[in-house]
Amino acid sequence: MTALLDELMTRRPDVAFEAELAPGQVEEFRSRGFIQVPRITSDEELAWLGLVYDALFQERVGAEKGDYFDLSRPYDSDGEDLVPQIITPEVRFPELKQTAFWRNGGKLARQLMGVDDSVYGWGHMIRKPARIGGGLPWHQDEAYWDPGFDYRALGCWMPLDEATIESGCMSMIPGSHQGDIRPHRHIGDDPAVRGLQTSPDPAEAARAVPLPTPAGGAVMHDRRTLHMSGPNTSANVRRAYANEWQTRPVARSEPYERPWHTEGVEAFAKRFGDDARARF
Ligand code: NI
């Protein structure tokens, strides 16, 4: 752990900002599978989160345990990071759970899902460097998760920099959350690449809605909504911080058939050791 990160944790601003849903957004979320929130935290907190974020990526925090990796190429392969991701930074830095972003995300998630306090969150950060940042193909977030469980969950995705079409904002397919998990495969058909992709039919993909989002705004989407983001061809970094909000997963008597998940876990355990399975 770096002195810089420890020092930053002592400087976390206390932010009282309260985000609210607009009238009709619960219904919109349920019918379309996503909504946009103009603002989910304050400028002050955004500035602090930006410093924390930069330090985490600079230090590649968690790389030794497989909590830092590039989504688009095999673990530890040579080359520049194009879509690096950090998983569950709040485990190392619980101060991230004391933010307005965390608090507001949880509050809106409970309202959107229509559930009570039995909701918990976990975070990840995806960074797209200027000009070379990679895109992420169509996928459903639940496709990444353990097929032995049923989930009730949504993602709360916040860019720390304005996300434009050029810098790789998200696109969503309205209504796609209402179906099952589609067949997915690993990018490049290599299970040592964490990123997954699926192929919606062209007519469906043509209905996709791009969602440019200001820094500090948020996109909230169902765990099954089909989404993608393009490459970052702009001159600016596109940093994004997302929290997943979910009720306790319910174990299934028969797991879903999602062979890509099993293959991914095996490749991850091969690189980071058997005890890494639980962190996949
Ligand atoms: Ni996703």
Image (cartoon, rainbow, N blue to C red):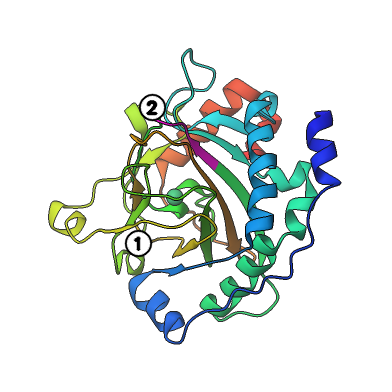
Q: Is residue 70 left or right of residue 205?
A: right
Residue 279, position in %: x, y? 65, 39
- 86 is higher (above) or lower (below) than 159: above
Span shown in magenta = 126-131
- 35 is higher (above) or lower (below) than 81: below
Q: Is residue 66 left or right of residue 11?
A: left
Residue 136, position in %: x, y? 37, 40
Please report the residue visible at 64 percent of the width from the left and 24 percent of the height from the top.
272
In the picture, the quarter occupied by the N terminus is: top right
Circle 2 residues within 10 Å: few <14, some 14–19, many ≥20: some
Between 263 and 216, the one nearer to me in the picture: 216
Please report the residue visible at 74 percent of the width from the left and 57 percent of the height from the top.
97
In the picture, the quarter occupied by the C terminus is: top right
Amino acid under disc 2 = Ile
- The residue that disc 2 covers is 132
- The residue that disc 1 covers is 180
Residue 21, position in %: x, y? 52, 79
Between 66 and 68, the one nearer to me in the picture: 68
**Does residue 117 appear in the picture of this structure?**
yes
Residue 51, position in %: x, y? 68, 40
